[in-house]
């Protein structure tokens, strides 16, 4: 019996019979959003509305970059820099957006300082209802607990939770994190990933290193 092929990253609904799950790469059309292959979003409501319901105040030019093999839980929101308000005067209210004669003062709300691009690494798990604030970097292999509000960068293979999210623990020690980043299994050819799924999901760092297409220097 022939071996079935690996999953197709261009298929919008990768799980048969589960319309609540969408692959984001074939869904996203905004030039300001970049998503790697096999990253998915899960939502029983309307997962195909991810760009408008889950990426908020995205007026540019800052980008949202999400790596490969990321799992994004229901209700995760990315707040972009367009949500920023002036805070250097008595009022934070954005009067010019109301139009009329107030629109003559549009310069008061344009060019507000932003925090830059929002970056989510590869193999990141964003838990149910987490909120990612503008300009943060979430490292490779990180986990964000459900309901967290991420206001600062998350280290590679860090586990964070809370409001504001704080580091709970590291999944691996510094030496092993360096080894994992050097291995970067998410960049392996898909046939090689397919052949070593069990090692990627349940093996140790030594096992993963032994399975790499080209073993890194130690």
Image: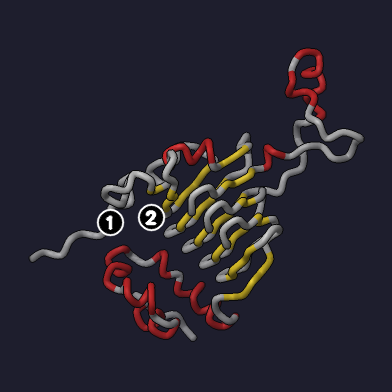
- Left-right relation of 16 to 185: left
Q: Position of residue 64 (x, y in %)?
A: 56, 47
Quadrant containing the N terminus is: bottom left
The residues tagged by marks 2 and 1 sit, at their Cα atoms, a distance apart of: 9 Å
Q: Nearer the viewer, residue 45 or 133?
A: 45
Count residues near mark 1 (Cα–Cα under 10 Å), then give few for <14, some for 14-19, many for 20+.
few
Numbered circle sitting on residue 53: none
Q: Position of residue 30 (x, y in %)?
A: 49, 37
Instruction: Spot the residue most to the right.
Output: 90
Instruction: Spot the residue most to the top.
Output: 100
The answer to whether residue 182 is above or below residue 67 is below
Q: Which residue is labeled 1 in the image?
A: 7
When asked about the image quadrant of residue 177, the answer is bottom right
Earlier residue among tags 2 and 1: 1
- Left-right relation of 76 to 152: left
The reply to whether residue 152 is in sight is: no
Q: Tell me, what colour scheme is on the image?
A: secondary structure
Q: Which residue is labeled 2 in the image?
A: 38
Residue drawn at 45 percent across, 74 percent down: 183
Instruction: Spot the residue most to the left.
Output: 1
| SS assignment at label 2 | loop
The answer to whether residue 140 is above or below residue 128 is below
Count residues near mark 2 (Cα–Cα under 10 Å), then give few for <14, some for 14-19, many for 20+.
many
Q: Position of residue 43 (x, y in %)?
A: 44, 46
Residue drawn at 66 percent across, 61 percent down: 162
Q: Position of residue 122 (x, y in %)?
A: 48, 61
The answer to whether residue 150 is above or below residue 31 is below
- Left-right relation of 21 to 178: left
Disc 2 to disc 1: CB gap under 8 Å: yes
């Amino acid at each position: 019996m022939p071996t079935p092929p690996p999953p197709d990253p261009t298929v919008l609904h990768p799980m048969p019979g589960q319309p609540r799950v969408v692959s984001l790469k074939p869904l996203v059309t905004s030039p300001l959003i970049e998503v790697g292959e096999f990253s998915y979003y899960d939502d029983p409501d309307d997962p195909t509305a991810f760009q408008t319901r889950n990426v908020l105040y995205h007026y540019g030019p800052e980008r949202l970059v999400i790596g490969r093999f990321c799992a994004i839980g229901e209700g995760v929101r990315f707040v972009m820099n367009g949500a920023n308000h002036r805070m250097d005067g008595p009022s934070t209210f954005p009067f010019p957006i109301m139009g009329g004669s107030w629109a003559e003062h549009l310069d008061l709300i344009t060019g507000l300082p932003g925090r830059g691009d929002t970056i989510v690494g590869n193999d990141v798990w964003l838990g149910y209802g987490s909120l990612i604030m503008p300009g943060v970097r979430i490292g490779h292999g990180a986990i964000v607990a459900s309901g967290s509000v991420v206001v600062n960068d998350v280290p590679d293979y860090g586990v964070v939770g809370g409001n504001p999210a704080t580091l709970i623990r590291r999944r691996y020690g510094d030496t092993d994190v360096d080894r994992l980043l050097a291995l970067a299994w998410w960049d392996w050819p898909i046939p090689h990933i397919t052949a070593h799924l069990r090692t990627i999901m349940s093996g140790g760092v030594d096992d993963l290193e032994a399975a790499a297409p080209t073993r890194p220097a130690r």
